[in-house]
Image: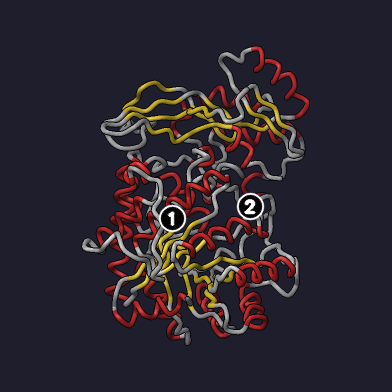
Amino acid sequence: MKVVDKIKEAQQTKTLGYSFEYFPPKTELAFVHLMDRLGRMAQWHPEFVSCTWGAGGSTSTRTLDFCSSAQSYGLNTVMHLTCTNMEKSTIDQALKDAKSRGIQNILALRGDPPRGSEFWESVDSRFTHAVDLVRYIRQEYGDYFCIGVAGYPEGHVDCPDRDQEVVYLKQKVDAGAEFIMTQLFYDQVAFVEWLKKCRESGIHVPIVPGIMPIPTYQSFRRMIHLCNIHVPEEISRVLEEIKSDDQKVKTYGVALAVSMMKYLNKEAGIYSFHISTLNLERSTRLILDQLQPQRSLTGKPSSGKVVPTLPIHDPTRAELWDEFPNGRYGDSRSPAFGETLYANQIQPTSQAILKWGLPKTEEDIKSLFANYINGTIQSLPWCEERLQTESEAIRQRLKQLNEHGYLTVSSQPAIDGVPSTDSVYGWGPTKGYVYQKAFIEFFVSDKQVNQLLKCFNEQSDSITYYATNKKGDFATNVIDDDAQNAVTWGVFPGKEIIQPTIIEEASFKSWKVN
């Protein structure tokens, strides 16, 4: 079914409707668990679900598999498709595969550069902008596909001129786009003003706001930095007061999403909302509970098909076990493993020079990392924000390591039973206790690595390590390939032990840039 019909139906009947966005996780087991989670969330009757498309088609197989599986659950699906760094043949194959699997809805995007690429660049001159992809799909497939495009209420990072961005949006609609889904935002007043500009410019297709409930304070900070999103002062103030309590941040994120959706419904007449789930389920469920307290969680989804019964004996446990994911080193079994907010963002050369100068020697690189540890510079390509306060206890040691050529990108000190409300080390719900093992992640020259690994192997009873390089050579002193080493965990009243940071071979290898 074409999802634009569902969106229009919600508008005509003045009934609130919701859709969910997912991304393909990085490991096979995480994908299997995502399908379990999707089966439960399908019972909440979303208008449709969408799945993102990795830059250059890097997730094409899993994106297509997700959409196919979602349809078997009776869900309408939207497949994201980009033309970034992709040959025309890859685009053709993606569209052919989508049609053969019965996928009828495409979100046509330009896309972002692949990891490791500094600039966005067109591989095929026929696909320079999203509008080119819209035109091509219409040319090749006529009206078979329902095409959506992205809208940017605060302007695109490559086009901060909001008025010009509306002109580009109108071009995409004129080329054949039938609906618009927006980038996430938190300034609802600015959205209403942007919506008015769209309508005045002649854009009359449905516009669906993108809503992302805040997951954690740190991921929120990273997100607004990467997307260049304006945050109203009141939201910043509230988050600053509760940032050390992850549960309060999540609760506030749900309340804020509900408040925004109610405001947009009342002030702008919006009835359909697209919720970015980050592959988690609890925040989405709580949002729907508050907006539709009488809604049924059983029965048939919108297509009329019955959702298969899944092997989950305790749904509450199923939605909570990975509720506090921790960046790149969360549990590789979690559906949320591989969340794109943690991908490294390459700075354009001009911005990089302003931030970091022009390092030319190995000593220059060492100084750059050491200056980040000292606080002289505020960020690195792998660390968008200042060194966290918890690193104060090991700052001097980190400085020494970097001066000796061990270029650190992630670390944490050992802590033993600190209250979960602690302003420096605390996380998770209140009245708990959190623990950490010492951990460090760094780059090192191949000239130093052999001697380093020799030292590690001599202390294998107290140090475990994983090491790799761009060629794919791999070394470890962990015997069991499936071993998991929890380096952060918490104990909370009435809950099982929560382990948000796990170091294991699968998660370590999955983040290496090939």
Residue sticking out furthest to the left: 294
Q: Assess disc 1: are there few (<14), some (14-19) or many (≥20) residues with their C-alpha within 10 Å of its C-alpha.
A: many
Does 184 sit above or below residue 10? Answer: above
On residue 347, the disc is 2
For label 2, the crowd category at 10 Å Cα-Cα, with few meaning under 14, some 14 to 19 and many 20 or more, is some
**Percent from the top left, x then y, of residue 464?**
59, 22
Which type of secondary structure does the marked residue at label 1 adopt?
helix
| Residue 416 percent coordinates (x, y) | 39, 21
Q: Secondary structure at mark 2?
A: loop
Q: Is residue 247 above or below residue 49?
A: above
In-image side of 383 versus 154 (left or right): right
Does residue 190 appear anywhere in the picture? no
Q: Nearer the viewer, residue 299 or 402?
A: 299
User: From this viewpoint, is residue 304 visible?
Assistant: yes
Q: Sequence-wise, which precedes: disc 1 or disc 2?
A: 1
Where on the picture, by quarter, is residue 142?
Answer: bottom right
Viewer-proximal residue, 225 or 277? 277
Amino acid carrying mark 2 in the image: Gln
Q: Quadrant of residue 200?
A: bottom left
Instruction: Return the mark for residue 389.
Output: none
**Residue at x 57%, y 40% (from the top left corner):** 377
Along the viewing direction, whichever of 439 and 498 lies nearer the viewer: 498
Where residue 448 sits, quadrant-wise, is top right
Q: Looking at the rendered structure, which numbered label has been put on residue 38? A: 1
Position above or below: 269 against 258: below
Spatial CA span between label 1 and label 2: 35 Å
Q: How many marks?
A: 2
Counting from the top left corner in percent of width and height, residue 407 is at 65, 31
Q: Quadrant of the C terminus?
A: top right
Query: With 300 as the anchor, is 60 left or right in this view?
Result: right
Q: Horizontal and vertical percent for residue 249?
A: 33, 46
Q: Nearer the viewer, mark 1 or mark 2?
A: 1
